[in-house]
Image (cartoon, rainbow, N blue to C red):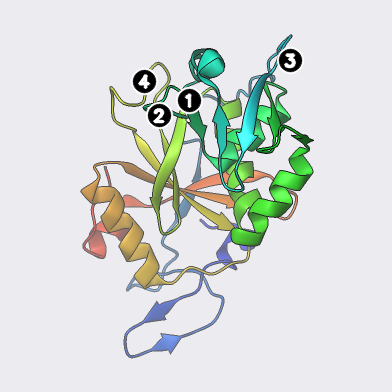
Amino acid sequence: MLSSGVSKGFSQERPGLGKTGDQELSDDSGEDPNLEPIDPFNDNEVVEEPPEPEAEPAEAIFDGQKGYVAEEDADRISRQGFYGVRLDDGRLELESVELIHLIDWKRVVAKNAAGKRIQMSYIVSALMERDPELWVNYLVFRDLRSRGFAVRQGFGGGLGFRVYARGDKPGTTPAKQLIYVLKEGVPITLDELDRVTEAASAARKKLVFAIVDQNGEVNYYRVSQTILENRGGESE
C-alpha cells in the first residue's frame, strides 16, 4: 500500500472524469494500485562510506553546464566508478551531477575557463538556474552511487538515470533499471505513468520511482505488476 506521504503526491486523471485532485492512483476496482516500497537493489540498504580524499584531486573545468577533466587524469577518474564519457581529444566529460558528486567526495576540484577555482555552491547555483530540479536529481544520484552502482543519465522526460548491476560496465552491458525521479507531494498523472512504463518496457528495463522527501531522503517504489498489466503496459 502507498504510504500517506507518497500517495498524496500522485494525482488521478482519467479520460472523461478529469482530475480528481491529490488522490491515490487506483485501478478500475477502486483499490490502491500498490506503489510498492521496495529495495530495488537487493542490498539490504547497505550504504558504502565515501572514499578517502585523493592526495591530489584532479582538476575539472566547468563550462557552465558540464565538467571536463584533462586527458592525463581522465583514466584515473573514470576507473574510480565509471564516471563520465571519454571525448575524441582524450578529455573526460562529466555530467553535472557527476561533477558535483566528485567535488563533494573531494576527487576533483573545479575551475573556470580562466583557471580560477570555484566552489560547489557556485556550480549548483549556476546549474539550478537552468534546471531547478538539479538538486533533487543529485540526491538520487548520490544515493545510488553510495550503494556502489554505476549510474548513467537516463532518457529525459523524468527518466533521470540508468542503473547498472554491480560488476557490470557501462558501454559493454545494458543497464538493468530506469529511475524516475519525483519530489514527495508532486503529482504524476496516469497518462505520465503510462508513458514512462511504456518507455521502460520498450527499453527492456525495470522501472523504479525514486521519491525524495522533504528531508532529502530517497525511497524507492515500483508500481505493482498487476496494475501495469491491467493498463496494457509491461514491466520486466
Provide residue 74's location: percent of width, then percent of height. 51, 18
Q: Which residue is labeled 4 in the image?
A: 169
* Mark 3 / mark 1, whichever is N-terminal: 3
Provide residue 172's location: percent of width, then percent of height. 28, 22
Q: Residues within 10 Å of mark 3 (few under 14, many from 20)?
A: some
Mark 1: secondary structure: loop
**Which amino acid type is marked by label 3?**
Pro
Cβ–Cβ below 8 Å for labels 2 and 3?
no
Cβ–Cβ below 8 Å for labels 2 and 1?
yes
**Which amino acid type is marked by label 4?**
Lys
**Which amino acid type is marked by label 1?**
Arg
* Mark 1 / mark 4, whichever is N-terminal: 1
Provide residue 231's location: percent of width, then percent of height. 26, 65
The answer for how far apart the CA atoms under marks 3 and 1 are is 22 Å
Q: What label does residue 91 carry, if any?
A: 1
Along the viewing direction, whichever of 11 and 144 lies nearer the viewer: 144
Q: Which residue is labeled 2 in the image?
A: 87
* Mark 4 / mark 3, whichever is N-terminal: 3
Along the viewing direction, whichever of 121 and 48 lies nearer the viewer: 121
Count the labels in the image.
4
Which numbered disc, 4 or 3, marks the residue closer to the eye?
Answer: 3
Q: Residues within 10 Å of mark 4 (few under 14, many from 20)?
A: some
**Which amino acid type is marked by label 2?**
Leu
Which numbered disc, 1 or 4, marks the residue closer to the eye?
Answer: 1
The answer for how far apart the CA atoms under marks 2 and 3 are is 26 Å
Left-right relation of 192 to 188: left
The answer for how far apart the CA atoms under marks 2 and 1 are is 5 Å
Along the viewing direction, whichever of 203 and 65 lies nearer the viewer: 65
Which image quadrant for residue 176?
top left
What residue sits 64% from the left and 20% below the top? Answer: 48
